[in-house]
Amino acid sequence: MKDITLHADENLIASAHRCAAANRTTLNAQFQLWLADYVQRNGDCVQRENQVAEAMKVMRKLQGKLLVGRKLTREEMNER
């Protein structure tokens, strides 16, 4: 497990510690739950990053191997 340093208002941290203690848990455990939930809810951004990386790999592989038969116009090269 990796250690990280976070900065927050002292009063907010104290309140969070009290809430965690009232729920018989730790602030660290609650942060881990929040972090897992955050990644799950925002997993599409990670998936998108992976898709872009894969697409770039394919483009690098194909670079110089595709023949169009004529010079493409600027508009054709920028078409999506």
Image (cartoon, rainbow, N blue to C red):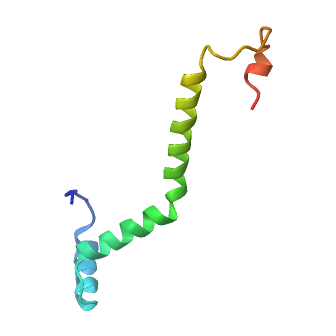
Q: Is residue 23 above or below residue 16?
A: below
The picture places residue 57, in percent across and down from the top left corner, at 52, 30
The picture places residue 47, in percent across and down from the top left corner, at 52, 51
* Residue shown at 26% from the left, 80% from the top: 15
The picture places residue 6, in percent across and down from the top left corner, at 25, 59
Quadrant of residue 12 within the rendered picture = bottom left
Judge by depth and name the residue closer to the eye, 63 or 78: 63
* Residue shown at 50% from the left, 44% from the top: 50
* Residue shown at 55% from the left, 24% from the top: 61
Q: Is residue 55 above or below residue 34?
A: above
Count of numbered tags: 0
Quadrant of residue 38 within the rendered picture = bottom left
Q: Is residue 49 above or below residue 27?
A: above
| 48 to the left or right of 37 | right
Res. 11 visible in picture = no
The picture places residue 63, in percent across and down from the top left corner, at 59, 18
Q: Which quarter of the rendered picture does the C terminus lie within?
A: top right
